[in-house]
Image (cartoon, rainbow, N blue to C red):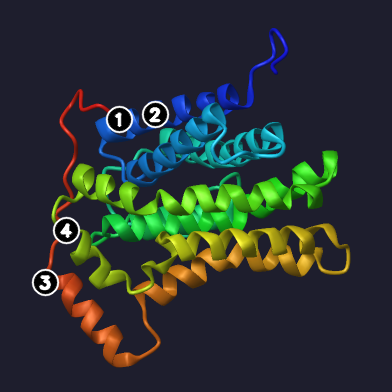
Amino acid sequence: MTTPGVPSPAEKVERVARELALRVGRYDAERDHRATFAYTYYRLTTSLTTALRTGTPPFAEPDWVADLSVSLASAYFSAMDATDTWLAAFPRSGGEVAPGDLPDAVPPPWRDVYAASSVRHSYVLEEVLFSMMAHMSYDLPLALRSLDARAGNHRHIGDFHRMNDLLATCVDEVQDDLAARYCRGLRSLDRLFTRDDELFTNYGIRMARGLAWFNSDRLREPTSADAATASISRSTAAFITRIRFPGDWKLRAVSRLLRLLIPPRRQWPAPGTPIG
């Protein structure tokens, strides 16, 4: 039962989806590489909106689920807005940037993602994976810690796992639509370059979100908070390095050669292409 004048859980999450849709449209129009993750995020968020509207799965406390979604999205929006402010002050006409080029207002993992995606031979699935890593390994533990400070999280672990199940089951469909929108026919080719695309799978999402819950506990514990903060701040950079520069020199050489030989072949949707 909803209170008059107070948005329902589904309405709260729908607002997040609308904001994501606006950003997808803007990034598409500007041919900004951030479009691919924004689109992925939009699709997953609309799935959560539908679940909250229909009651499937039946969340024990839908308001907590919605509050987590809003808090998590706020972290992403803040990072993107800080990046936009930097871009407005220092317009780019292409070319690579380094993480240190971005201001401190952009959290370290998102600086790493933006820099990694600015290279000439950057592939769509890589960019989505890097962004997912930043969002789940950095933004999510901090969002969980924030909610815990207000109401406590441990009684909500069942709903957290229901969210994991819901998002994980959407992955295959979202990947297909992502490929159709931004890299038709190249999904398997993108995977050739990532090798670690398990993150963008049913299992990978469950594992990454489970680790985020663990790290949120570490952030709340005074004796481990500093180490946890350092860990989640550098995890994305380590993930990018593992994908771009494999430890085995033979794999590293092959990866470098393939990147030189095979272009990204990114496509952009035509103006007016529906987002939903």
Residue linked to disc 2:
21
Is there CB contact under 8 Å for labels 4 and 1?
A: no
Mark 1 residue element? loop
**What amino acid type should be assigned to the residue bearing mark 4?**
Leu
x then y, percent, for residue 136: 56, 55
Residue 261 - label: 3
Residue at image coords 54%, 26%: 53
Determine the CA span between mark 3 and mark 1: 32 Å
Mark 3 or 1, nearer chain start: 3
Residue 111: give x, y in percent of width and height. 50, 54
C-alpha distance separating marks 2 and 1: 7 Å
Q: Residues within 10 Å of mark 3 (few under 14, many from 20)?
A: few
Could you say which is closer to the camera, residue 59 or residue 276?
59
Q: Which mark is residue 186?
A: 4
Q: Nearer the viewer, mark 3 or mark 4?
A: 4
Assess disc 4: are there few (<14), some (14-19) or many (≥20) residues with their C-alpha within 10 Å of its C-alpha. some
Q: Nearer the viewer, mark 3 or mark 1?
A: 1
- Tell me which residue sits at (19%, 40%) in the image: 268
In the displayed structure, 174 sits above or below 208; it is: above
Q: Quadrant of the C terminus?
A: top left
Q: Earlier in the sequence, mark 3 or mark 4?
A: 4
Q: CA distance from mark 3 to mark 4?
A: 15 Å
Asked which quadrant contains residue 91, the reply is top left
- Marks 3/2 in contact by CB < 8 Å: the verdict is no
**Residue 275 numbered mark, or none:** 1
Question: Do the CB atoms of the residues marked 3 and 4 lie less than 8 Å apart?
Answer: no
If you read the primary sequence from the N terminus, does the residue marked by circle 3 or circle 2 appear first?
A: 2
